[in-house]
Image: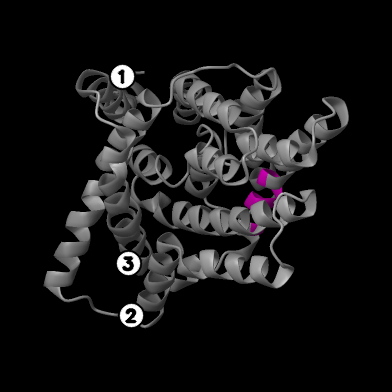
Amino acid sequence: MTDIISLLLPFFGLILIGYIAAKVTKQPAEALGWLNTFIIYAALPALFFKLVSRTPVEDLTRIDFIATDLAATYFIFVLIYIVGRRIRKNRMDESTIQAFAGAYGNIGYMGPGLALLAFGESAAVPVALIVCVENAMHFIVAPAMMAAAGDDQRPRGQIAADIVRKVSLHPFILSTAAGFLAAALHFDQPPALRQLVDYLAQAAAPCALFAMGVTLALRPLKRVPAEIGYIVPAKLIVHPLVVYAALTLVGGFEPVWIYAAMLLASLPTATNVFVIGQQYHVWQERASATILITTALSVVTVSLFLIAIKSGFLPA
């Protein structure tokens, strides 16, 4: 238990510090812009490049791992979508945002730092693969679903070009691709480059978690949607259990890969879900409330999953 507390206290403590700082200083939301730019375009890409480029290339081509993880994640997506569409009788666009709220975790901001703290650098490759492939998939599914719902009136060719641009130019994906290339070519990084990448990578987790705390403080809880009743347990409990079960049943994966995937699946709803809702003017306030509630509750649920993993209750 002491090990779990030692792991989680600095992690969630950074979120709490950011939250308190935002409440005390009362800075406008726009003040966070440059910090987010540094995190998304410099620190996290450096972390992904570092982790992938220093990994044997044969570990980077586990299509079976990625396919199983995606299947489990989109099982949750489809399940939440069906509940929203068929049972709650919500519109297609609203059901889509709800489905993302239940399946799209905060894997980019929270995932790398927590997984590396919990499992060490052996978790680096599965984390990088999950973050890049899942984000790419979400970038494809979101505009496609919104176009089918009629919320995106642009020509199909323009939508397709926008999807390709977002996927191919996203800094996480570009940095991971560069890491793949460096690993495949056995590129010997000059000491100066290695040190620069290390400096940026070390800043990724603290800055991302602090920014997340600030974001939560600047997004007050105005409305608790009824859908919270099934989205929250699906995201924080069912999703990680489905990922764990799928990877365990398929088999052939190192335990740390299974646990890293499970941990990433247990993370709260991603801030990008609010961004998608805002972009299409759908379910915005309720998406914001879902992010806030799942993040607060994840302190408990993530802790319980880590205890279950560390105690051997969930054997891989």
- Residue under label 1, please give it: 2
Task: Say what amino acid the circle numbered 3 marks.
Answer: Arg
Q: Position of residue 153 (x, y in %)?
A: 72, 57
Picture quarter with the C terminus? top right
- Measured in 3D between alpha carbons, the distance from the residue under mark 3 to the one under mark 1, in whole angstroms, is 31 Å
Whether residue 3 is in magenta: the answer is: no
From the top left corner, tell me how far across and down residue 305 is, in percent: 51, 27
User: Dot 3: within a 10 Å radius of its alpha carbon, few (fewer than 14), some, or many (20 or more) residues?
Assistant: some
Query: Which image quadrant is residue 248 in?
Result: top right
Left or right of residue 12: residue 143? right
Say which residue appears at 43% left-offset and 43% top-offset: 111
* Secondary structure at numbered mark 3: loop
Q: CA distance from mark 2 to mark 1?
A: 40 Å
Region in magenta? 67-73
| Mark 1: amino acid | Thr
Main secondary structure found in the magenta portion? helix
- Quadrant of res 180: bottom left
Classify 10 Å Cα crowding around label 2: few (below 14), some (14-19), many (20 and above). Answer: some
Q: Nearer the viewer, residue 140 or 66?
A: 140
What amino acid type is highlighted by mark number 2?
A: His
| Residue tagged 2 | 186
Magenta run includes residue 71: yes
Indicate the quadrant containing the N terminus: top left, top right, bottom left or bottom right: top left
Q: Is residue 299 left or right of residue 190?
A: right
Q: Which residue is mark 3?
A: 54
Task: Using the rendered image of the protein, determine whether residue 10 is visible from the camera's viewpoint.
Answer: no
Compare residues 286 and 100 and report the one nearer the observer: 286
Marks 3 and 1, the one that precedes in the sequence: 1
Residue drawn at (65%, 51%) of the image:
142
Residue 241 drawn at (x, y percent): 64, 33
